Image: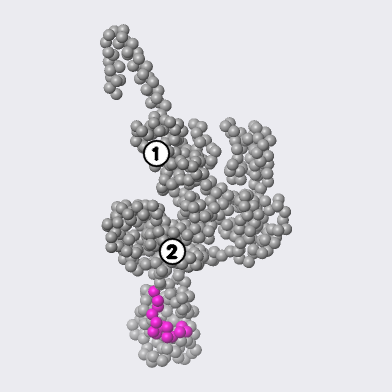
């Protein structure tokens, strides 16, 4: 056996670096001598790529170098080494004179890589969270080229892609306890503010491309506001208002801090939430590990890139009809269109449906040959009597109540729970239901709560629609809630609301505006209004006092009971 080949099989691992070139050349000396009697064949096909072509997910020089055994080096001239290097590796000059380049970042990670919190997360990603980090980085290989291209086109640092890693692990369907959704974890109100469609039929927070566009717009705005990418990232997590107030409040403590140092100076103050303090260190650690995964023992698999063509379709078109028209596997079409929630395009607008690359033209041509009824994902049925309930109506048409509600978010019912006669309801077709997602109304901040128009057991509305001029505190008092409780019910971080927004107020009792206003003058905002039981107690007290007064007049003495009641 060729001694160089035998040596390769027994070689130990060694970290990448400039020493790798010395090791390779030492190995080549053995190859040059052992291969003198027969044509030299490459030991293993590892071409040395130009630095610009290196993948951001795979460190350059990823082939494993080795430490030669003692006595394995055979003297050879420099010319022999150069010729052998050229035969095996191609560019001998690069091996001999140019060190393997370290990854480059367009975020300032080198300055802060020794920061205590950064090193904590680097160690975490490479130890206890290694498998999860590797899985998320692997998922990211599908979306990272698209994200980097969009960041580059907008003049933003490409390494901001790692925000999506720490936000969601590059998961388009990620959902937080606060009802932040998608790869970039947008709240519904923020998503709408930056131009994304979020409603019953379509939630663009789940669309990787549209959500990335929104994140870039939002981060660009925050960077211009704060003049720092790391402060922008902190504001992305904790809210721009809180960061802005912190900078003003601790202006004296932050004096002298410039650029990205301002975030770390602010994080030292007892002001930002712990999650926000750790957010930027996680971003830096993710960038350090993401570009050198092998160095931290992470194996990253490469997935097919997220690429697509698009075809514009009519309102209410079934995704199944699109798939059949283009001969597209249903799983592929579903994967490309996570923003379409109900298995059909919105009934009120034409939209672009994503299809596999190369299938847009044949799909559009085939759809044009279908009549409107064949394309549509539902039929219409009219309620002709006033005794049907939604459940019986759904059963009559072979669907479940949930499926009926999926396609009729504005279905009208009477106080007795019966359908209002004369309205027309959509009846979903089987092929459309195969694409529908089990996702509650994204129009409200908190998933899993009552939908608009539903009522609590006590008869009060479970969802309040904000009217112009209303405040969060006023709405909270109206429903017998504290403002903090109302925010918690709706997964809200701040108090900003706007007309038309729906707020969950389930499990609360409606309080009249007059009573609420009176209570606010005499009790703290956190104290709930009196319930019916105390009111009855007050009535009983008055009756007892009257009896005591009557007894006093009759006996000429003050009642002990009345006296004790008066002191309370």
Which residue carries the number 2 mark?
A: 160
Q: Position of residue 331 (x, y in %)?
A: 59, 58
User: Range of the magenta residues?
Assistant: 89-102
Does the rendering let one see residue 169? no
| Residue occupied by mark 1 | 482
Please state the horizontal and vertical placement of residue 266, each as a whole percent of the image. 31, 57
Foreground residue among 528 and 162: 528
- Residue drawn at the location 66% of the way across and 50% of the way down: 377
Q: Earlier in the sequence, mark 2 or mark 1?
A: 2
The front one of 418 and 222 is 222
Q: Residue furthest front?
A: 469
Quarter of the image for residue 420 reads: top right
Q: Is residue 263 left or right of residue 478?
A: left
Give the quarter of the image for residue 320: bottom right
- State the image quarter where residue 362 is shown: bottom right
Location of residue 455 in the rendering, given as x and y in whole percent from the top left corner? 52, 35
For the C terminus, the image quarter is top left
- Which residue is at a point 44% across and 61% down the rendered structure image? 220
- Residue at 43% across, 74% down: 60
Q: Is residue 97 magenta?
A: yes
Instruction: Say above or below: 188 vs 308.
Output: above
Is 311 or 165 nearer to us in this picture?
Answer: 311
Left or right of 540: which side holds 468? right
Q: Residues within 10 Å of mark 1 (few under 14, many from 20)?
A: many
């Amino acid at each position: 056996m060729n001694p160089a080949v035998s040596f390769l099989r027994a070689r130990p691992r060694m970290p990448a670096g400039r020493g790798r070139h010395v090791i390779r050349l030492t190995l080549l000396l053995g190859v040059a001598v052992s291969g003198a009697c027969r044509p030299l064949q490459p030991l293993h096909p590892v071409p040395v790529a130009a630095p610009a072509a290196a993948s951001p997910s795979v460190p350059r020089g990823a082939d494993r170098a080795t430490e030669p055994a003692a006595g394995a080096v055979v003297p050879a001239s420099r010319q022999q080494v150069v010729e052998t290097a050229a035969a095996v590796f191609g560019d001998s000059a690069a091996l001999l004179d140019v060190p393997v380049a370290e990854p480059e970042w367009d975020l300032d990670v080198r300055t802060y890589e020794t920061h205590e919190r950064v090193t904590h997360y680097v160690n975490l990603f490479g130890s206890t969270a290694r498998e999860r980090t590797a899985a998320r980085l692997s998922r990211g290989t599908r979306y990272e080229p698209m994200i980097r291209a969009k960041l580059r086109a907008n003049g933003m640092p490409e390494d901001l892609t790692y925000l999506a890693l720490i936000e969601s692990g590059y998961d388009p369907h990620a959902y937080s306890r606060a009802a932040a959704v998608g790869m970039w974890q947008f709240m519904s109100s923020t998503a709408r503010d930056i131009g994304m469609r979020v409603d019953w039929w379509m939630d663009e927070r789940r669309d990787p491309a549209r959500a990335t566009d929104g994140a870039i717009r939002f981060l660009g705005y925050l960077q211009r506001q704060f003049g720092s990418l790391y402060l922008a990232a902190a504001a992305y997590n904790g809210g721009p208002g809180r960061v802005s107030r912190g900078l003003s409040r601790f202006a004296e403590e932050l004096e002298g801090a410039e650029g990205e140092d301002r975030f770390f100076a602010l994080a030292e103050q007892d002001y930002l939430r712990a999650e926000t303090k750790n957010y930027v260190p996680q971003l830096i650690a993710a960038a350090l590990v993401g570009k050198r995964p092998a160095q931290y023992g992470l194996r990253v698999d490469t997935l097919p890139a997220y690429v697509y063509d698009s075809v514009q379709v009519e309102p209410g078109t079934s995704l199944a009809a699109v798939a059949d028209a283009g001969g597209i596997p249903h799983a592929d079409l579903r994967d490309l269109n996570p923003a379409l929630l109900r298995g059909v395009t919105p009934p009120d607008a034409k939209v672009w449906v994503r299809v596999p690359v190369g299938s847009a033209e044949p799909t559009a041509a085939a759809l044009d040959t279908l009549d409107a009824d064949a394309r549509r994902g539902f039929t219409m049925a009219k309620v002709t009597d006033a005794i049907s309930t939604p459940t019986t109506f759904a059963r009559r048409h072979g669907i479940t109540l949930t499926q009926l509600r999926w396609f009729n978010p504005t279905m009208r019912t009477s106080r007795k729970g019966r359908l209002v006669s004369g309205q027309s309801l959509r009846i979903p077709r089987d092929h459309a239901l195969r694409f529908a997602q089990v996702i509650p109304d994204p129009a409200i901040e908190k998933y899993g709560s009552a939908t608009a128009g539903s009522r609590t057991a006590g008869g009060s509305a479970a969802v309040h629609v904000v009217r112009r001029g209303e405040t969060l505190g006023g709405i909270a008092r109206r429903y017998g809630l504290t403002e903090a409780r109302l925010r918690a019910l709706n997964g809200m971080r701040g108090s900003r609301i706007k007309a038309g927004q729906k707020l969950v107020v389930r499990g609360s009792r409606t309080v009249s505006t007059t009573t609420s206003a009176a209570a606010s003058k005499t009790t703290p905002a956190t104290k709930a209004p009196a319930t019916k039981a105390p009111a009855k107690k007050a009535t009983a007290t008055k009756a007892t006092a009257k009896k005591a007064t009557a007894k006093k007049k009759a006996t000429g003495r003050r009642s002990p009971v009345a006296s004790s009641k008066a002191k309370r």
